[in-house]
Amino acid sequence: MRWSPFLGIPLLLALVSFIVFKLFPNSSTNLTPLGQRLFTVEDLAPFNGTDTGLPILLGILGSVFDVTKGRDHYGAGGGYNHFAGRDASRAFVSGNFTGEGLTDTLHGLSSTEVKSIVEWRDFYFKTYTFVGKLVGRYYDGEGNPTKYLKGVEAKAARGAQLLEKQKKEEAKVASCNSRWSQEEGSEVWCDDGYPRLVQRPVEIALTGKMSKRCACFKEDELGQAGLEVYDGCDYFAKNCRL
Ligand code: HEM
């Protein structure tokens, strides 16, 4: 049989692509959607929106998404360009898009903050295309979740439970009505009962901070521990100006 050049060229091309794929499995030509591509920090960096010929990629909790369709936000000059070409998970709650703020460590964040970052990751799964994983803090060299990622997910789940508990606890005692105006300032009042300041039950576990709310208590409940009368407000006032 004679060797046909029409058959030879496609065969040659197929051979060359196979060799390139084997030699450079992580090259930018291998950006398969929904792929399990593993990125290093250095692999991810060029996809930061500067080169308009490349897709724009964003890492969050080690998951990498193609956010090219959001070029207005993530491209050069966009308000969220700092998220492109890296994993800056912490900045999703800190809002610090500069220098040390652009980090993937969540050290010291509260469970609600961690939960909020996990929700951002959900947003990217829903809105953009998942293209792979970033090897480092959240995924190991085999693409398996690290202890750190499992810890983050557990903390977020705990945050969700605590928020649920907080909601249930707060529903037991009605919140005060409140209004604010430039001329009159703030005012709280109860249609039924008396306004008292109370510590939110699970707030410290949730956010690491103290936080109080105004709730309405009936006359026979006013002796409970932990109820604070507003400064300058009478014990039996239904309405308090702050
Ligand atoms: C922690 C602070 C903040 C973070 C991490 C953040 C993050 C983001 C991200 C990632 C997007 C793009 C979402 C997408 O891909 O569609 C976005 C969109 C947007 N952000 Fe923020 N943001 C923050 C604060 C703010 C603030 C303070 C404002 C307003 C004063 C704001 C206004 C907007 C608006 C209007 C859009 C949508 C723009 C559009 O769809 O054209 N953001 N934000």
Image: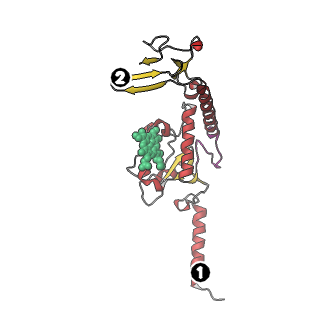
Tell me which amino acid carries mark 2: Glu
Q: Is residue 108 above or below residue 212?
A: below
Residue 210 percent coordinates (x, y): 52, 22
Magenta range is 134-149
Report the front residue among 166 and 102.
166
Q: Is residue 30 above or below residue 206?
A: below
Ligand 1 sits in quadrant: top left
Q: Tag 1: Cα neighbours inside 10 Å, few (<14), some, or many (≥20)? A: few
Residue 173 percent coordinates (x, y): 58, 23
Secondary structure of the magenta portion, mostly? loop
Q: Residue furthest front?
A: 191
Q: Tag 2: Cα neighbours inside 10 Å, few (<14), some, or many (≥20)? A: few
Task: Look at mark 2 in the image and give the residue it sits on.
Answer: 184
Tell me which amino acid carries mark 1: Gly
Q: Residue at x 34, y 26 (%)?
A: 182
Q: Secondary structure at mark 2?
A: loop
Task: Look at mark 1 in the image and give the residue it sits on.
Answer: 8
Q: Residue furthest bottom?
A: 1
Total numbered badges shown on the rendered structure: 2
Q: Is residue 146 above or below residue 31?
A: above
Q: Secondary structure at mark 1?
A: helix
Residue 75 percent coordinates (x, y): 42, 52
Report the front residue among 86 and 90.
90
Depth-wise, is mark 1 or mark 2 nearer the camera? 2
Residue 196 percent coordinates (x, y): 51, 17
- N-term mark: 1 or 2: 1
The quarter of the picture where residue 17 lies is bottom right
Confirm whether residue 96 shows in the render: yes
Confirm whether residue 224 shows in the render: no
